[in-house]
Image (spheres, rainbow, N blue to C red):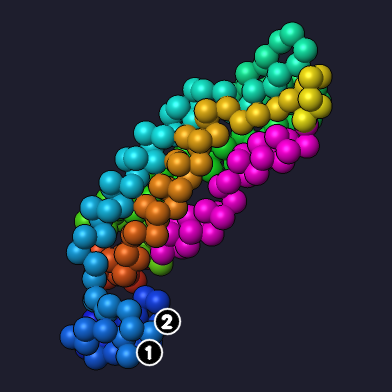
Amino acid sequence: MTAREAGLVACTRCGRAWPLGTADCGRCGARLVSRDKNSLQRVWALWIVGLMCYFPANMYPMLLTRQLFSVDESTIIGGAVDLAHHGAYGIAAIILVASVVIPLGKFWAIAFLAVSVRQERGFASHRRLLMYEVVEYIGRWSMIDIFVVAILSALVQLKGLATITPGPAAFFFALSVIFTMLSAQAFDPRMIWDAQPNDNEASDNG
């Protein structure tokens, strides 16, 4: 039995359950809604903006390294390849996973969740909820590239000899991460349980 079937609505901020139809949470004052009807519209809008920012984040240079008479521009993938050529395979793998694999996986997972809640058949609800929780968890690690750029920019400042500054890709990558996180947060996970009326049957079939 779901909370809606039991005549209850839970506060998404503090978790307190109230009778269905209660307008505001008596504990924290948050607005109570059984389902956010505009959730998917915000999810897709933020998802599209995040995807649009992700392309220039990989096309423009992430780091600008200025030496005496030269300027080296490194994209995310190009920088990882350079690190691999210098033997830093572990760091290169971390950058590729954090900057390419995880963001693309998050885009796919959010899109899959937004589409799947409109279908009555598919993955079992508890599997989709697990996918949503994983997307929420890894969101905190999505800024690793920005942290690396900030640290290098602060440490490598040898005046006229060599300096490292963030490239335009850093701005777009940060925007992509922010909009992707907002897209995941805009998703109402309670809709997962409405999309599949028979979880046990779906679990057996899966």
Q: Which residue is mark 1?
A: 27
Classify mark 2: residues with Cα within 10 Å, few (<14), some (14-19) or many (20+).
Answer: few
Prevailing SS of the magenta stretch = helix
Q: Tags 2 and 1 in contact by the CB under 8 Å rule?
A: yes
Which residue is at the front of the view, 67 or 204?
67
Q: Position of residue 36 (x, y in %)?
A: 24, 67
Side (left or right) of 161 relative to 154: right
Disc 2, SS: loop
Q: Position of residue 125 (x, y in %)?
A: 35, 65
Residue farthest top in this picture: 69
Disc 1, SS: loop
Residue farthest front in this picture: 159
Look at the image and tell me in which quarter the N terminus lies: bottom left
Classify mark 1: residues with Cα within 10 Å, few (<14), some (14-19) or many (20+).
Answer: few
Q: Quadrant of residue 78?
A: top right
Disc nearer the start of the sequence (2/1): 2
Side (left or right) of 156 relative to 102: right
Query: Label 2 to label 1, Cα distance in Å?
Result: 8 Å
Q: Position of residue 178 (x, y in %)?
A: 46, 48
Q: Which residue is mark 2?
A: 14
Side (left or right) of 145 relative to 67: left
Which segment did they paint magenta?
A: 129-156
Look at the image and tell me in which quarter the C terminus lies: bottom left
Which residue is at the front of the view, 8 or 149?
149
Q: Position of residue 46 (x, y in %)?
A: 33, 47
Q: Of tags 2 and 1, which is closer to the observer?
A: 1
Give the residue drawn at x 47%, y 34%: 172
Disc 1 marks which amino acid?
Arg
Q: Quadrant of residue 79?
A: top right
Give the residue drawn at x 38%, y 37%: 51
In this view, 69 is above or below 39: above
In this view, 190 is above or below 183: below
